[in-house]
Structures are given as C-alpha cells and as structure tokens.
Image (cartoon, rainbow, N blue to C red):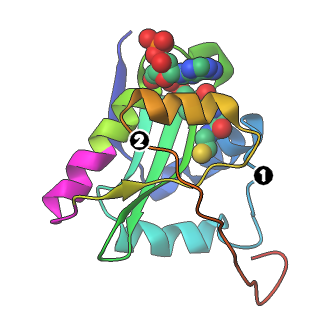
Amino acid sequence: MAVEVRPLRLRDHSAVVALLDACGLHPRTRGRDSRSAFAGQLRSNRALYLGAFDGPRLVGMVLGTHDSRKGWINRLAVYPEYRRRGIGRRLVRACERALQGLGLGVFAALIEPRNDPSTAFFESLGYEPTQIRYVRRKLRQDL
Ligand SMILES: CC(C)(COP(=O)(O)OP(=O)(O)OC[C@H]1O[C@@H](n2cnc3c(N)ncnc32)[C@H](O)[C@@H]1OP(=O)(O)O)[C@@H](O)C(=O)NCCC(=O)NCCS
C-alpha cells in the first residue's frame, strides 16, 4: 500500500506520541505534547501538522509552525523500518508548500548537535547549516 501524507487530527495523538518516543524525540506528554496542548496546536497550525500513513498506521510526521517571519520544521520523525524511502522528504516538502501558501519563504529546523543523520537529511533538501546557538528558558521543566 502507498504511503499517504495528510493532515494530522486529534485522534492521531496517541500514535504521534508513540512515534516520537520510538524515534528518540522524547515526547513531553505533560507539556507541549499533551493531548490538550496538541489540540490547541492543531487549531493554530491547521494543514501544517502532517502525518505519513501506511493504511491506518502513522509511520512519519512533521509539525510545521511559523512565527510570521520564518516557517519552522519541528518534530520530524519516521519509524526506522520506513526510513530511506523518501517519506521524510515528502513530509518536509508538503510542510514547506503549506507554509509557502501562508506567505512564508524561509524554512528552518533546529537539530541536536550530534544528530548527523538529520543534518545530512536537511542538507540533502537544500538547507544550509548555520552556527547559530539556540537558547531557551522554561517556566517549568516538564513544558
Ligand atoms: C531524519 C529522518 C526523519 C529522515 O527520514 P527518512 O524518511 O529516512 O528520509 P528520506 O528517506 O526522505 O531521506 C532523504 C535524503 O536525506 C538523506 N538522509 C536521510 N537519512 C540519512 C542518514 N541516516 N544518513 C545520511 N543521509 C540521510 C539522504 O540524502 C536521503 O536520500 P537517499 O535515501 O536517496 O540517499 C529520520 O531519519 C528520523 O526519523 N530520524 C529520527 C528522528 C530525528 O532525528 N528527527 C529530526 C529532528 S531535527
């Protein structure tokens, strides 16, 4: 069966958490990956939260967001047994198209320093690595 890319829905939430977990992306189920947080994010980022489905099974995902200046590619994940089949590329390109439809022309992603496969993936899609250091402050550690 062909893998189909389509918008995520609230009913996909538990599959999203399982996929993030399996891909080592540490879902914050008491914080920004909780069901209620996900529901709110879906309302704000309609058509940017995308899943790749093999039949009913969620096998890949990307959460697109934007800050009105840049489009952000977040939480890109594909189950190991589905990798290197172009699913990640399809997800990112679909997300970029949706962001472009909102008037955005700059796309960016944050990558952990030792995640060389992900860096290679984004470079293969035309993304340029930068030396920018990311800083953050959390009001609570579980957010
Ligand atoms: C990064 C990830 C989403 C890529 O998904 P994918 O479906 O395997 O990617 P694609 O098949 O679309 O790969 C497209 C191209 O990216 C490059 N690429 C992908 N994975 C790569 C790897 N492990 N090493 C080197 N290059 C890689 C290749 O050029 C590939 O094209 P090719 O297969 O024709 O050589 C997947 O490896 C993953 O889920 N990793 C764990 C989670 C993660 O780190 N997410 C990123 C957070 S920033």
Asked whether 23 or 108 is in front, the reply is 108
Query: Looking at the image, is mark 1 or mark 2 nearer the viewer?
Result: 2
In the image, is 25 to the left or to the right of 9? right
Q: Residues within 10 Å of mark 2 (few under 14, many from 20)?
A: some
Q: Residues within 10 Å of mark 1 (few under 14, many from 20)?
A: few
**Image disc number at residue 127:** 2
Task: State the predominant SS element of the stretch in magenta.
Answer: helix
Residue at 34% over, 26% down: 4
Q: Quadrant of ligand 1?
A: top right
- Any magenta on residue 103? yes
**Image disc number at residue 26:** 1
Q: Quadrant of the N terminus?
A: top left
Q: Which residues are magenta?
A: 95-104
Q: Quadrant of residue 5?
A: top left
For numbered disc 1, what is the local secondary structure?
Answer: loop
For numbered disc 2, what is the local secondary structure?
Answer: loop
